Image (cartoon, helix red, strand yellow):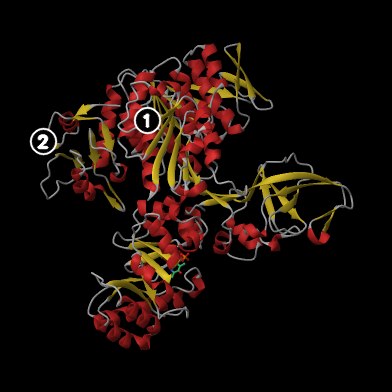
Amino acid sequence: MAQLAISKIAELLNAEFSALYPSEIVTRILLDSRQFSSAEGVLFFALRGKNHDGHKYIEDLVKKGVSHFVVEQMPTQTFDANFVVVPDSLKALQDLAKHIREQSSAAVIAVTGSNGKTVVKEWMGQILQKQFSTCRSPKSYNSQIGVPLSVWELEAKNEFAVFESGISEPDEMEKLEKILQPEIGIFTNIGSAHDANFESNSEKIAEKLKLFKHSKQLVYEANGSNLAKQIEVFTEERGIQLLSWTRENGPADLRIEVKIEEAQTVLIGTMDERTHTLQIPFTDAASIQNAIHCWRLGLELSLDEEEMKKSFAKLNPVEMRLQMKAGSNGNIIINDAYNSDMESLRVALHYLENQAGNRKKVLIISELQQSGLASEELFSRMAEVINRFELDEIIAIGKDLKNGAFALNSTAIFYPSTKHFLKNIYSHSFKQSAILLKGARSFHFEEISSALEEKSHQTVLNIYMNRMVYNLNYFRSKLNGGTRIMAMVKAFSYGSGTYEIANLLQFHKVDYLGVAYTDEGVALRKAGISLPILVLNAEPSSFHDLVEYNLEPEVYSFHQLEMLENALKNYNLSEAFKVHLKVETGMHRLGFVEDQLKDLAEKLKSHRHIKVASVFSHLAASDDPEQRDFTLGQVAKLKQMTDKLKSDLGYSFLRHISNSSGISQYPEAHFDMVRLGVGLYGIGSNVEDKKHLNVVSDLMASVSQVKQLKVGDSVGYGRTFVAEKPTTIAVVSIGYADGFRRSLSNGVGEVVISGKRYQVVGRVCMDMVMVDVTGSDVAEGDEVEVFGPTISVYELAQKMDTIPYEVLTGISSRVKRVYFME
Ligand SMILES: *Cc1c(COP(=O)(O)O)cnc(C)c1O
């Protein structure tokens, strides 16, 4: 990583500089105050975004000891810290990165494309590292801020650097090009769909190609596709040398024959009339393409052939996610199989800190192996990163860790190998702990993970947290800065989980959470959630818990109000108790009607224990454009009712009425807050929302058995299916008790195995269902998609004659939830 004096940084940025400590050295860039771990050497860039302003966190960070800031505006308060004032903090960050890049003598390789960027970057880095000092982007750092952070990792000794770059909007690539100035490029491929932000696929390609406008060489697959043609024109115009390869008959420098075997692929390549062979431990098309990109470049750079062979034979799948699942004894297990760079260790420890809530924090770590540093230096860096966090227990696995370089501030328990640890795992009796597993591949930490896991039914709901963040930000972009968001996490977060989701939402700064029952709120408080929580149906028997756990009820009737007032008399409250009034505007469910408002205001004025935090109503048909007038009537009615209440009560409160579909369809209904429910989980009610949102989960089962039927054999209860020809069926591990409804029996329902659809035969049972897989090579243990990339939740809902809400909330609690974080 780079190291620069703060005064030097100010000078590079041509910035106004108020220096208290001009010669102090910056070693780390911080962009998100929530990622703070320790203050030493940290420079915070106060970035401004649509819904975010880093300047707000300065005071807090100064208190924590951070002494260097890049800001767009001097704080009004005086702080004991260095401030570098620039017109645009993001641009300053990028300019700084550009400078670091220009000082480096490393040959820079940049990777872009729709898919495979991270894999190609990781593999190319691993292959080069065998022979050269090589820097590569951490994780999938490829954005306007990810690229500068990657460049910050460059060191003077690096001979190569491999960085990935991604864009989501026009004009972003030029900025990345200025920073990276790559000598060599790799264009992996292009997806067929064009993103919402580009006019066409060719516009997207043209935009991505800008990364290479000053490059000398570019690797691509010469397969005659539109992408290939566009690349050929682009490089021809600029005199860029193409490093081409092909699997077809057209012209290319490297011609490849692909032989797929049982568990590996043999690549036979001919270049300059010489034949080369390689083996890779993958058989899927994407891995094959990614590997050949790397090979083509390896041959160009004249890397040692024997070394390359060895590296390719041992390529690892690139795990791009943190995975979190429930363990036994109330533990949660966070499994980080990212390649083991220091940045990913730091990110994983943060994640542990954020997810742990009230749980004990445990780190199980092995010797890391892949960062190309000598072990002493590597171990001391590992310790340095770990020491920035407060952990309750550390378990270190590997013979060499116990030496002096791995100097932890707190005590750790050492084991020479994973086997030794597993033998002793019960002596640790983990309970109510958040356990982070961070192991190099050769340590086989998956064995630890399965030892700690809750053993249950093999049917899982995979929940992708990054999709939820994406959905949240989509709705945020529709709101004015001042409008608050209440995220609805009722009904087990629409089936997606409890504290895991609430925790993520708290981390991403929603303003309120909404639950259906008091118990749901209590569970969130116990898990350490501190956001304000609205309870929609607070029963009188739960009033004690409301007070005890600082939960805010919806109040919808005089009777309920009186009971609450009476209950509150038993407590010595230091502040008035917050409630949320529900008013009737057309749904005809719970709520006060207009005629009651005068009385209501009188009563509330006499109940001094109670304060109205908000007044709200609910839209009955915001998803139906035909009912626009009715919806606008509801909006007008809320306005009128709340105006009156406000003047009668003599103080103001928040007003809200909009649910997910109302947010994009009715900007006039945003008021002070919106209540975001199903949209957060990726379900849209109109074309535009559907285009942008991502369903957050996939429901996966597995094949328990494959069976051959003879003519006349029947399947399942009631024998509703009888084979008319020899038939093969697969028994799948999901039934109506999991949420796969019985109405999907007899050919109505379908599932997907290895990308192909198969129909349900016979009746759906409680825990299983049978599908017809005749003529396929479906085998026991195969993964089965119930909904996901092929069968959408919308489609499944339609087949079950219901709406996606019911599909999601109907997935029973015995289905294991597994969380993924990019
Ligand atoms: C569930 C619920 C919402 C969220 O509705 P979505 O359509 O899922 O966005 C909002 N307000 C109230 C009162 C609710 O009960």
What residue would you read off at disc 1? 342
Residue 364 in picture, x, y percent from top left: 44, 34
Mark sitting earlier along the chain (1/2): 2
Amino acid on which the number 2 mark rests in the picture: Ala
Residue 495 in picture, x, y percent from top left: 52, 58
Q: Residue furthest front?
A: 427
Residue 51 in picture, x, y percent from top left: 31, 53
Residue 690 in picture, x, y percent from top left: 51, 57
529 w.r.t. 345: above or below:
below
Q: Residues within 10 Å of mark 2 (few under 14, many from 20)?
A: some
Q: Residue 19 — which label?
A: 2
Q: Residue 355 — which label?
A: none
Amino acid on which the number 1 mark rests in the picture: Met
Q: Are marks 1 and 2 in contact (CB under 8 Å)?
A: no
Image quadrant for the N terminus?
A: top left
Determine which quarter of the picture holds residue 763.
bottom right
Determine which quarter of the picture holds residue 341.
top left
